[in-house]
Amino acid sequence: ATDRAIAMLNRVRISDPVSVMQRYPHQLSGGMQQRVAIAMALANDPSMLILDEPTTGLDATVEAEVLDLIAQLRQELSASILFISHNLAVVSNMCDRVGVLYAGMLVEEGPTEVVFNDPRHPYTVALLRCLPRGGQRKDQGRLDTIPGFLPGIGVDIKGCAFADRCALADDRCRSELPPLYDLGGRLSRCFHHDKAQALPRATPSDVAPVPRAAAAPVLRVTGLNKTYASHGHA
């Protein structure tokens, strides 16, 4: 069993597996904990690996290392990976296909590039409008927001769960659950999937006001030094 554990830890690129096995979880860094958890999941050589928020709480550098490891293992094991995350940037880089869930229900599914570039459900459209993008300045247009709140747990929803927050919703949406429409290699659970891109914005797209020119500082300090204590000495 020990040899098997060492082999698994080596597989996830842990250089000193024996030392890691002798430690408690709180003695490991966040990235090391994630690697150990992945090694445990690989112990039975699964044909599918389910990763639920595998990079939550990790800094950008460690996150990149873990994601690179996952990509390598995918090729090495020829295994399918179900990647669950709220990080849309990671999803766009890691996944071939993406499924969008709202209130626990699949509302859109399809090839990642297609869904991100041409969403066909109002929730997906609104979600992507909230996402900051590279090269976009805050003084050149505002991000959108999604009005309202998620349905409460246990609430009986008769129609579309997103209807109360959707500007395209009508009486049919509020009384009848939309089916998953097959749009040719992709799915959308919306009666108005053909109008999803025309979803009215909840937040005006007016350019944010340009800040005034910098005024004179209220307080200016020069010649200030701060020394931190070391081993009880200032």
Image: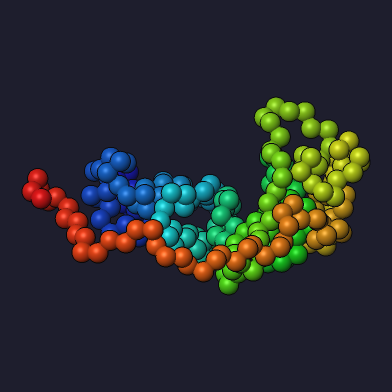
Q: How is the image coloured?
A: rainbow
Q: Residue at x 68, y 51 (%)?
A: 145
Q: Is residue 68 left or right of residue 119?
A: left
Q: Is residue 22 left or right of residue 43?
A: left
Residue furthest out toward the left: 233
Depicted 166 relative to depicted 75: above or below = above
User: Which residue is more in the foreground, 52 or 166?
Assistant: 166
Which picture quadrant has residue 178? Answer: top right
User: Which residue is more in the foreground, 12 or 135?
Assistant: 135
The quarter of the image holding the N terminus is top left
* Location of residue 149 in the rendering, given as x and y in whole percent from the top left corner: 69, 39
Depicted 53 relative to depicted 117: above or below = above
Instruction: Report the number of numbered marks.
Output: 0
Q: Residue at x 30, y 41 (%)?
A: 26
Does any portion of residue 142 appear in the rendered image? Answer: yes
Does any portion of residue 115 appear in the rendered image? Answer: no
Residue furthest out toward the right: 172
* Location of residue 23 in the rendering, given as x and y in whole percent from the top left corner: 25, 43
User: Which residue is more in the foreground, 138 or 117?
Assistant: 138
* Location of residue 21 in the rendering, given as x and y in whole percent from the top left corner: 27, 45
Q: Residue at x 10, y 50 (%)?
A: 234
Which picture quadrant has residue 216? Answer: bottom left
* Location of residue 100 in the rendering, given as x and y in whole percent from the top left corner: 69, 51
Q: Residue at x 39, y 62 (%)?
A: 217
Q: Is residue 214 left or right of residue 164?
A: left
